[in-house]
Amino acid sequence: MAGTEKKYYHAIQIVSDNCTGCTSCVKVCPTEAIRVRNGKAQIDPTRCVDCGNCVTICQFHAILPKSDSLDIINNFKYKVAILSSSYAGQFTEDIPYPTAKKALLDLGFDQVAEEAFVTEFIVSIIREYIRQNKHIRPILSSNCPSVVRLIQVKYPSLLPNILHQEAPMSILTRFLREKIQKDTGLEEQDIGIFLIVPCVAHVTAVHQPEGAYKHLQDGAFSIGMIYGKIRERLRKMNGDNSRIDTYEQGLTWALAGVEAEMVDCDDIRALSVNGTDNVLEILSKVEDHYLDQYDYIVLRSCTNGCVGGCLNVENPFVAMSRIKKLIKNAEHQDLDVSDLEKLYKDGQFAVAPLEPRSIMQLDQDIKQAIQKMKKLNEILVMLPGLNCSACGSPTCYALAEDIVSDKASIDDCVVLLKRHQKEED
């Protein structure tokens, strides 16, 4: 059975030499995917949802994000970069957004597209989906890949509630790939489409998409890495006055709460929730049918929306302020989305139904599993119930689970160990 288990890709890596075993990462993981054993952090790949909380909390740079190397674009004849909307908020006011976008061409891309181009079009898709699926309430946004994976791991009963349409950057990818093939005559394998993203969950989604029929993009680069390379090239571009189109009015997708505001209308009630702890609380309420009065709920694991992703470089509040200013000063553009509408009507943006993620079972054999559960409860009674994480497991229940699975020992409980030492003294 073990040989058939699914392998999971994650855009997070542990640098063991830097790990002090402090357990800070253990405490912030929403799926209890991290343990500290022998003084070093370990991540269970079946439980990890790439929320990035561990990356943000680690002060010792022992848990690092990873994304693709820019060199991989050279494997393609025609290279396209698709920008997350949060990219626009990373640059100081002395660097105009068109310049920051244009600089990507200097990095070797043949075309630079923006998530912002499709956001208003997607609002119409979401509204139509909500109206066509009145038997499902609430419908949950699929835009945050970390939240989608969180539902797979902890709330599988809510999988039918997820919006079964591609996220904005994937919709744009499908559109561009078809258009470029038609315009250039190139074969599909000659066209490389890459995302420039604000968080590790989006990197993981490129390499191991959940619900998509196939891999849509050819790689993902962190905004932080691209930002550094752009800053190096800006001086060379001072004399470049060539024009490049931007879509500031669609940058709203990067901001917390705006997707819900855009979808909300007379017959649709929407709610926006940001931050992992808040998302967990709301998902529990949805599971209990406490929020059935809402038609659509937007859930994002980063506190400020995509500007809060761990691969960004700017403070999320500063980035949010810059994006709001760009939106405020933007001129309205009537975009031609007829080709997008055709692809949508052809079902090109629909995704396959999602399946629950198989996480650790006590035992494949039901009798053995019952015996282990009995032993787990006996161990749990012995443990102090402090959930201090000093043992390297996130909670006392998790430690008991680890013990019956032979992944830990009762002696790992520091509190019990001290009690026994006092009794012996």
Image: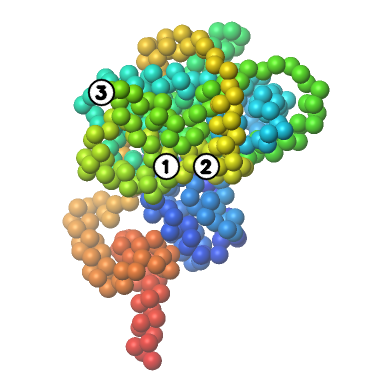
Element at badge 3? loop
User: Please, is residue 36 above or below residue 109 in the view?
Assistant: below
Q: Position of residue 16 (x, y in %)?
A: 57, 58
User: Residues under labels 1 and 3: Cα distance?
Assistant: 24 Å
* Residue 213 visible here: no
Q: Secondary structure at mark 2?
A: helix
Q: Position of residue 411 (x, y in %)?
A: 38, 74
Q: Quarter of the image for the C terminus: give it.
A: bottom left
Looking at the picture, which amino acid does disc 1 mark? Asn
Q: Identify the residue under disc 2.
A: 308
Q: Disc 2 marks which amino acid? A: Gly
Do the residues bearing badges 1 and 3 touch, measured as CB atoms within 8 Å?
A: no
Number of residues whose C-alpha sits closer than 10 Å to that of mark 1, classed few (under 14), some (14–19) or many (20 or more): many
Q: At 48% from the left edge and 60% from the top edge, which residue is drawn?
A: 24
Q: Are marks 1 and 2 in contact (CB under 8 Å)?
A: yes
Q: Residue at x 44, y 31 (%)?
A: 258
Determine which residue is flagged by label 3: 133
Which residue is under mark 1? 274
